[in-house]
Image: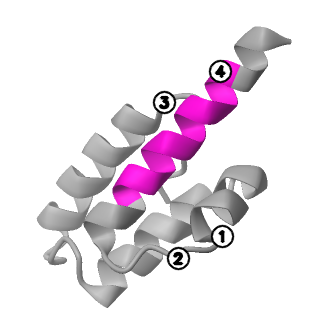
Amino acid sequence: MLKLHFPAINKYMSEFEDLATLAGYTIGSAESINLFLKGLTTLSDVFKKVMDHPTPDNYYDLKNKAINVVKARQLVNALK
């Protein structure tokens, strides 16, 4: 199973979309969103913040929120 390894969010997204398409999933379907979220669970703090209010309504909002959460975590880590 594909998992997010901090801070490689762009790599995770690219690989996820490629693999999901190869497997016959439609990007944005409920099944692909669930698989995307499972890959985020390796970093529970990222997963929790992505799912925090407001919860993304679709795959593209979910993807953008994940990118923003990872970038924010990178900034916090850089400031330590």
State the extent of the magenta-drawn residues as a range.
63-75
Magenta highlight on residue 73? yes
- Determine whether label 1 and label 4 are within 8 Å by CB: no
Decide if residue 12 is on the left or right side of residue 1. Answer: left
Residues under labels 2 and 4: Cα distance?
22 Å
Is residue 6 visible in this depiction of the protein? no
Q: Amino acid at mark 3?
A: Ala
Say whether residue 48 is left or right of residue 56.
right
- Residue tagged by mark 2? 55
- Which residue is most to the right? 80
Q: Residues within 10 Å of mark 1 (few under 14, many from 20)?
A: few
Q: How far apart are labels 2 and 1 at the CA level?
A: 6 Å
Determine which of the numbered discs, if any, sits on residue 75 in the image: 4
Q: Nearer the viewer, mark 3 or mark 2?
A: 2
Q: Earlier in the sequence, mark 4 or mark 3?
A: 3
Residue 46 in the image, given as x and y percentages of width and height: 67, 51
| Residue at the disc numbered 3 | 8
Q: Which residue is mark 1?
A: 52
Residue 73 drawn at (x, y percent) = 68, 32
